[in-house]
């Protein structure tokens, strides 16, 4: 990583570390609040989703600060790796919530319903897999 981008990456890592929480498992959702208290469960899930949303904003700020460097392999891989981590935690929260409401069989299917190619952020699209988008001329073939 070039020296001129180390501060921006370090600032992102600090923000990410402050915003990272272990996604709740369905057992934690079941124990949260009184039995049948879906408002408490939804508040807990909402808290985790808000942390992930804040992390996406921090990732977008990093992407913008990298400017054209984000197309370099090191930056592209870093952005995609971070997207994968965020997406995996989103999937864990979603699967736990679906399983809480619909049972174990539905929870295992939740990730299939929520697959995305990446995140379309204000600063630009970040794919889950680095360099996964074909060049425009190759896509036309």
Image (tube, helix red, strand yellow):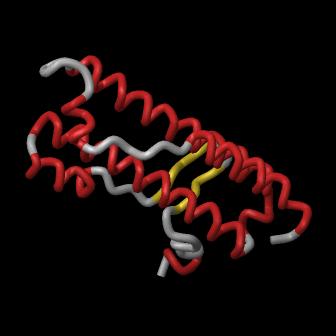
**Which picture quadrant has residue 131?**
bottom right
Q: Please state which of residues 119 and 101 is positioned toward the viewer in this rendering.
A: 101
Q: Position of residue 100 (x, y in %)?
A: 17, 37
Instruction: Say whether residue 64 is left or right of residue 129.
Output: right
- The residue at 69%/75% (across/down) is 73
- The residue at 21%/41% (across/down) is 27
Against 30, is 112 above or below? below
Against 11, is 47 above or below? above
Q: Please state which of residues 34 and 13 is positioned toward the viewer in this rendering.
A: 34
Q: What number of labels is visible?
A: 0
Q: Position of residue 130 (x, y in %)?
A: 57, 71
- The residue at 64%/65% (across/down) is 78
Against 15, is 31 above or below? above
Q: Quadrant of the N terminus?
A: bottom right
Q: Position of residue 114 (x, y in %)?
A: 30, 51
| Most distant residue in the right direction | 4
Q: Position of residue 39 (x, y in %)?
A: 26, 17
Instruction: Say whether residue 32 is left or right of residue 63.
Output: left
């Amino acid at each position: 990583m070039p020296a001129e981008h180390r501060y921006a990456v370090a600032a992102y890592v600090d923000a990410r570390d402050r915003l990272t929480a272990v996604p709740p498992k369905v057992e934690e959702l079941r124990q949260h609040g009184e039995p049948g208290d879906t408002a408490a469960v939804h508040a807990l899930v909402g808290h985790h989703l808000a942390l992930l949303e804040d992390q996406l904003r921090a990732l977008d700020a990093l992407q913008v600060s990298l400017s054209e460097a984000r197309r370099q392999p090191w930056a592209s891989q870093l952005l995609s790796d971070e997207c994968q981590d965020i997406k995996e935690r989103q999937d864990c929260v979603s699967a736990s919530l679906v399983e809480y409401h619909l049972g174990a069989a539905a929870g295992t299917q939740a990730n299939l319903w929520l697959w995305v190619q990446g995140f379309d952020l204000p600063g630009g699209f970040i794919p889950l897999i680095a360099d996964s988008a074909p060049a425009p001329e190759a896509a036309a073939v």
